[in-house]
Image: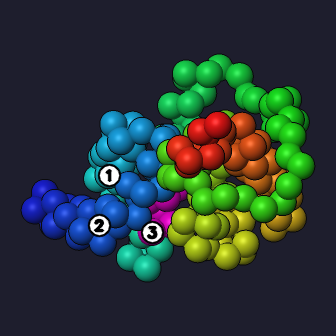
Amino acid sequence: MDSFERQQRVAELIGQHYELLYRVSFRLSGSVADAEDLTQQTFLTAQQKLEQLRQTESAKSWLLAILRHHFFRNRSRAAKHSVRLDSLPEPSCSTHKLDPFDSEELQAALDDLPDEFRFPLVLFYFHELSYQDIAAELSIPLGTVMSRLSRGKEHLRRRLCRDAETKQPTKPLAHQLP
């Protein structure tokens, strides 16, 4: 494949998959700058290893695998140790009903999750992949996907509920007058 053909294929991949990869990157990193860097790293690696892409139908999976690799590599460089979900402080929640929350609250709750729980949640809820597709993307058993989704959802539910409980409701001024 000559340089022009390579550039054309990469441009096609970017056109078809940039938005998806950026959204996944943003939900994983929680930062616009980090999401841009991660997306750029993914396409740079894709350009360098374009010969590995045998079937264009599998481009999305291939690119997500590259993105996941870069995300985990960048995280391991920064953290140098893994955090277990059960080692996070347990948020308490006395109610099962959540008030609406904004995307910043959701992102903060996602940021608190260890990577092995965050990635399946992002793929399932934000990109609507099936359990089977997530298992294939992450190269883990279906039962592990189900377990990680369940534990991650429970932690998010408790975290968002706790955040909702700690917010002070604002009373109208008329109720504050004697």
**Depth check: 164 or 117 in front?**
164
**Mark number, residue 60:** 3
Q: Which residue is mark 1?
A: 43
**Mark number, residue 13:** 2
Q: Secondary structure at mark 2?
A: helix
Give the magenta range: 60-65
How far apart are labels 3 and 2 at the CA level?
9 Å
Q: Residue at x 61, y 39 (%)?
A: 176
Answer whether labels 1 and 3 touch (C-beta < 8 Å). no
Q: Residue at x 56, y 47 (%)?
A: 174
Q: Say left or right for 93 vs 103.
A: right
Q: Say left or right for 59 vs 40.
A: right
Q: Residues within 10 Å of mark 2 (few under 14, many from 20)?
A: some
Q: Residues within 10 Å of mark 3 (few under 14, many from 20)?
A: some
**Depth check: 55 or 147 in front?**
147
**Depth check: 43 or 124 in front?**
124
Answer whether labels 3 and 2 touch (C-beta < 8 Å). no
Q: Position of residue 149 (x, y in %)?
A: 77, 59
Quadrant housing the C terminus: top right
